[in-house]
Amino acid sequence: MGRTVKQPKKFIVSCRVDDEEMRLLVERARSSHTSISELLRRSLELCEEHPALEKRHASATYA
C-alpha cells in the first residue's frame, strides 16, 4: 500500500506536446528542481491568482 497523502491525486490529465514544448517543460522542471506535474500544478495556481495574465496570454496565443 502507498503512503498516505493530504490531498490525493485521483485524476490523470494527458495532452500531446511537440518536441520544443517537451524540451521547455523538462528544462523548466529541472531548473525548478521539481517534476513536470508539479510545474503544471503551480502554473494552474498562478492562473488562478492572476486571471488577467491568463487572458492576455490566451488571446495572444489563440487570436
Image: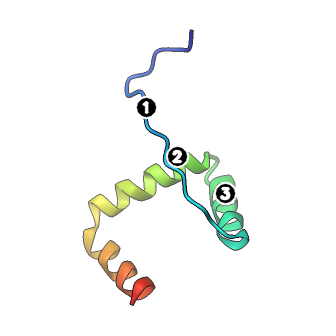
Please determine whether, in this image, residue 30 is positioned above or below residue 11.
below
The N terminus appears in which quarter of the rendering? top right
Mark 1 or mark 2, whichever is nearer to me: 1
Q: How dense is the environment of label 3, judged by Cα within 10 Å: few (below 14), some, or many (20 and up)?
A: few
Name the residue carrying label 1. 10
**Residue found at x 69% / y 53%:** 30
**Residue found at x 69% / y 58%:** 26
Q: Secondary structure at mark 3?
A: helix
Name the residue carrying label 3. 31
Q: Which mark is residue 38?
A: 2
| Disc on the earlier residue, 3 or 2 | 3
Tell me how far mark 3 sits from mark 2, CA to CA: 13 Å
Question: Residue 21, how many percent across, how many down?
Answer: 64, 69
Please determine whether, in this image, residue 6 is positioned above or below residue 13.
above
Q: Secondary structure at mark 2?
A: helix
The quarter of the displayed image where residue 60 is located: bottom left
| Disc on the earlier residue, 3 or 1 | 1
Tell me how far mark 1 sits from mark 2, CA to CA: 15 Å
The C terminus appears in which quarter of the rendering? bottom left
